[in-house]
């Protein structure tokens, strides 16, 4: 992998049992900054605790569509924490339907409102729900900074995201042989609208597919994006790092 470049993993899920080793491996791989993401009140508090403990870790606070049935009580109080940089992940997931459609819609709308109220980025999870996602955003008002994390759509969905001023975050799925649509989306989306992530510990990129993912592997996502866009890996690292800092309001160096 290219030496001397800086990466940001803009979406991961840290775990207490492996965090020291995970962060050491990320640092060795040139990953300067990580954003660890909340999926309910408890995991949001855990994300904040990691961010308090480590200078180069930042947090989000949100309610994942799987957890929407539990509501969003207590979430807004977390948004004033100085290391909480975004609301989410929030959205729709009609693949598993762990929460009902109405519960998901309510929790998603609440979090769109919180992102707008606090002028914070919104991190969106959408699965098998593109039409519903776009409709809710259009009705509630797309936050000024919005990202579709772990993007799984194609060129048409990417265009709809970009038309709404949103960023598209690419995960290790882009390296999977079956992910033709995602690769087409990367090819047609301007580099300045792309972010990269691992979504670790899930979705390890090739050649680690089937193993536990980690932030150190974000460079493999970046390398695939560089291949698809026919640019240097260092250019993808520079562009996505700059975009992630601007999107989340992160400092130029770890503080």
Image (cartoon, rainbow, N blue to C red):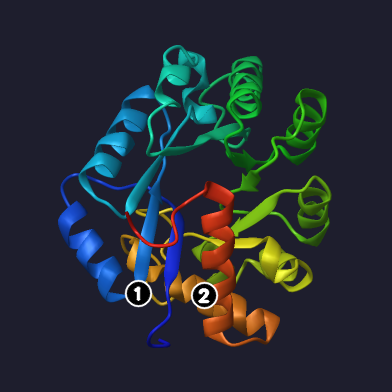
Neighbour tally class for label 2: few under 14, some 14-19, many 20 plus, Cα within 10 Å: many
Q: Secondary structure at mark 2?
A: helix
Q: Considering the image in quadrants, where does the N terminus appear?
A: bottom left
Residue carrying label 2: 237
Would residue 247 be found to the left or right of residue 209 on screen?
right
Q: Considering the image in quadrants, where does the C terminus appear?
A: bottom left
- Residue contact between numbered discs 2 and 1, judged by CB atoms under 8 Å: yes
* Residue drawn at x 78%, y 36% as measured from the top left: 134
Q: Earlier in the sequence, mark 2 or mark 1?
A: 1
Would residue 62 be found to the left or right of residue 224 on screen?
left
Q: Is residue 81 visible?
A: yes
Q: Secondary structure at mark 1?
A: loop
Q: Position of residue 250 (x, y in %)?
A: 46, 52
Q: Position of residue 65 (x, y in %)?
A: 54, 29
Foreground residue among 53 and 140: 53
Residue carrying label 1: 30
Foreground residue among 133 and 167: 167
């Amino acid at each position: 992998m290219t030496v001397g470049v800086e990466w940001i993993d803009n979406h991961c899920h840290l775990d207490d049992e492996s965090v020291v080793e995970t962060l050491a491996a990320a640092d060795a791989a040139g990953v300067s900054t990580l954003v660890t993401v909340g999926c309910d009140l408890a995991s949001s508090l855990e994300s904040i605790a990691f961010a308090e403990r480590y200078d180069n870790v930042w947090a989000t606070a949100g309610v994942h569509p799987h957890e929407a049935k539990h509501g969003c009580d207590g979430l807004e109080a977390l948004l004033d924490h100085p290391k909480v940089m975004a609301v989410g992940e929030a959205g729709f997931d009609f693949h598993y339907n762990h929460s009902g459609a109405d519960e998901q819609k309510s929790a998603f709308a609440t979090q769109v409102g919180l992102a707008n109220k606090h002028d914070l980025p919104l991190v969106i999870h959408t699965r098998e729900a593109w039409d519903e996602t776009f409709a809710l955003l259009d009705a509630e008002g797309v936050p000024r900074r919005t990202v579709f994390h772990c993007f799984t759509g194609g060129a048409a969905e990417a265009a709809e995201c970009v038309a709404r001023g949103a960023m598209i975050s690419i995960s290790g799925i882009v390296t999977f042989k079956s992910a033709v649509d995602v690769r087409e989306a990367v090819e047609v989306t301007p580099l300045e609208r792309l972010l990269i992530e691992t979504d670790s510990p899930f979705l390890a990129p090739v050649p680690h597919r089937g193993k536990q993912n980690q932030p150190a592997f974000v460079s493999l996502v970046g390398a695939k994006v560089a291949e698809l866009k026919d640019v240097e890996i260092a250019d993808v690292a520079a562009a996505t790092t700059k975009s992630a800092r601007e999107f989340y309001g992160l400092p130029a160096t770890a503080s």
